[in-house]
Amino acid sequence: MLGTLLKGVVIGVLVSAPMGPIGILCIQRTLNKGRWHGFVTGLGAALSDVMYAILTSLGMGVVINFIEANQAPLQLLGSLVLAIFGYYIYKSNPVKALRKRKEGKTSYTQDFITAFLLTFSNVFIILLYIGLFARFSFILPDTSLFLVAVGIVCIGIGAVLWWFIITYFIAKLKKKFNVRGIWVLNRVIGSIIIALSLLGVLSVLLSEYINLPVLQI
């Protein structure tokens, strides 16, 4: 169970961490309107992430027998998908999209709803979840419904934890904030995702050709 908890938190962080449109919006609101406006924006994104995690879990549950019969190839495919995603994050330059803009006075509720809708409109996040679930063997044939539910809650915790930390540091470093830091952050995140995917590929290859147990990293 502890493994599922940790995997859920890690998946939640990895889904939230790349600085895409919602990350830029969160940073803009933190800089322009204050930390809690940025954090509430992150909460809206986290709720959307949890909903997509649930949808992905349901979809994977339908093909659970297929997953059981093809666990190694699926983990390999998931690792390759993550490698492509990590490379995209590594090469992206969100600094170009970060412009200080004056937003009208909005409430926390409006911040939450707009962030939720923006994140929920990105249906391709399901592909990322499929890759992460396969990479971390998050849902296995013998995984109970209770454990899946706990794991999804941990995904939400990981996402919320990420937005809490990132808005904290941005607010603290507001006067010294350098947009180049976002570019560096994406480089670090992309490198971590690529490294995880390569470990997954290596684990599968070793288990298939050298008969070593698959590493559950």
Image (cartoon, rainbow, N blue to C red):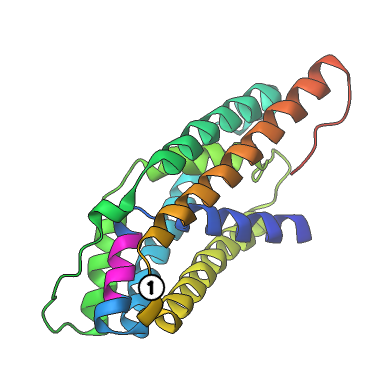
Q: Based on the displayed image, in which of its 4 quarters is residue 139 positioned? A: top right
Expressed as whole percent of the image width and height from the top left, the position of residue 51 reads 41, 57
3 in the magenta segment = no
Q: Based on the displayed image, in which of its 4 quarters is residue 45 positioned? A: bottom left
Expressed as whole percent of the image width and height from the top left, the position of residue 73 reads 65, 21
Expressed as whole percent of the image width and height from the top left, the position of residue 65 reads 64, 28
28 in the magenta segment = yes
- Disc 1 residue crowd, few under 14, some 14–19, many 20+, Cα 10 Å: some
Left-right relation of 194 to 91: right
Left-right relation of 155 to 170: right
Q: Identify which residue is drawn at 13% across, 75% down.
A: 102
Q: Is residue 201 above or below residue 100?
A: above
Q: Based on the displayed image, in which of its 4 quarters is residue 120 positioned? A: bottom left
- Of residues 37 and 4, the one drawn nearer to the viewer in this rendering: 37
**Label 1: which secondary element:** loop
Amino acid at the residue labelled 1: Phe
Expressed as whole percent of the image width and height from the top left, the position of residue 209 reads 82, 14
> On the image, numbered disc 1 is attached to which residue?
177
Magenta segment range? 23-29
